Amino acid sequence: MNEPPNIDPIAASSDGDVVHWLANDTHDERFIDNIFTELCVRLQRSGIPVKRASLHMLIHHPQWLGARIMWAEGMREAELARVDYDVRERSEYIGSPANEMQDGATEVRENLERDPSLGRKHAVYDEMRAKGLTDYAAWPLYHTLGKRHMVTFATDRPGGFDDAHIAGLLRLLPILALVSEIRIKNRLARTLLETYVGSHASELILAGATRRGSGTTVRAAIMICDLRGFTQISDNWPRDDVIDLLNGYFDAMSEPIERHGGEILKFIGDGLLAIFPLSQPSACANLLHAVSEARQAMIALNEKNGETGRAPLNYGIGVHVGDVMYGNIGSRTRLDFTVIGPAVNMASRLETLTKQLGRTVLLSQAFADLVKSDFDLEPVGEYPVRGFADPVELFAYHG
């Protein structure tokens, strides 16, 4: 256990002071888990014998249903755990306080000192008894439009919480609901932006880069990938199968890109656009490492799809390097944070040429010159590129 945070004991002398602190002195703290930790310590010092507490929040995230913040006496930082979408089908949820709360309960109170056969039956109560806890209380936290989350408190005081303790905790709930909702919505805004525009673009947008036409010039390696034969697949396959196939393909491509420092700016139907800014010294090498790992991931995906009778997926990748305009483009009321410029157009044309030349990955000479000393590249020859005056020397990469 860590040492508890330093808090002036005089400032935390009563539960009324705790309410005042929660309502008025938490404006500069961004994270709800930090606030919750300090709240629990202040409750202890105000005379409410909290030994263990948790905050359960439903969140909008592509991978997680929710999050649980857990604090126990002596902890300097709360423990943060993510909750999977399938948790509601597991024994850890069924019959739990969270289950009762989501089913509409307005309070869950359990006397942990009495005979276990007389109380609620769930592993969480057995765990608390084993840790010497004597009383447990859980209440919903109401956010805007009736959204329900949950907060819990437990004690090891003989006899459990008394009426004054419970009254003090209940006085906190409306303020805790407001304070937690603000932080959850801030985190939700960041999560949604990260999900839909990527981590770097989301940081710029949250920092105020929202004006149409605002942007900067970035030198980057550009990668454009497109799936082959997708029109025929989408015309002939059931909708859910098409979505499942696309998700598998994008996972195979995207995870290596993100792992090697690339930023995916856009999914366009069955294609994606990603950049590797040259502010990273090894950006071009990282791009090719990502391509290699994506190739292996696609082989594994095709093997898996083959077991269910699906035809293998083929794709083409065009890679170029150059200056791009990185910023806001769109109408007055609907913007897209993306990259544009001749370098992007070149990468797109090279991706198209992969079909004609029978290569999976085509690199421009400008890109190849930056990596050919470290990678085995196949010279393909000079070819005209639509929209560009001069032919371009091309290289294939099979790594």
Image (cartoon, rainbow, N blue to C red):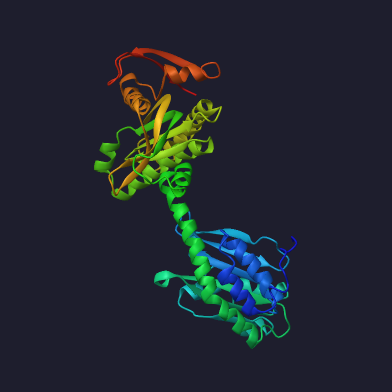
Tag count in the figure? Answer: 0
Find the residue positioned furthest to the left. Answer: 235
The answer to whether 318 is drawn above or below residue 3 in the figure is above
Residue 108 visible here: yes
Q: Name the residue rendered at 55%, 27% in the picture.
A: 282
Residue 364 relative to residue 140: left or right: left
**Furthest residue in direction top, as rendered:** 381
**Towards the viewer: 299 or 54:** 54
Relative height, residue 255 to residue 288 (above, below): below
- Judge left or right: residue 259 versus residue 306: right
In what quadrant of the picture does the N terminus appear?
bottom right
- Where residue 129 appears, as percent x and y from the top left, is 69, 75
Q: Is residue 223 above or below residue 310?
A: above
Is residue 127 in view?
no
Residue at 71 percent across and 67 percent down: it is: 7
Q: Nearer the viewer, residue 307 or 351?
A: 351
Q: Is residue 222 above or below residue 390?
A: below
Tell me if 364 is positioned left or right of 98 in this view.
Answer: left
The percent coordinates of residue 67 (x first, y second) are: 54, 61
Q: Please provide percent x and percent y for residue 27.
A: 56, 63
Q: Is residue 206 left or right of residue 14?
A: left
Give the quadrant of residue 335.
Answer: top left
Q: Quadrant of residue 211?
A: top left
Q: Which residue is nearer to you in this view: 199 or 334?
A: 334
Residue 304: image location, x then y, percent: 44, 40
Which residue does the image show at 53% across and 38% down from the upper left? 259
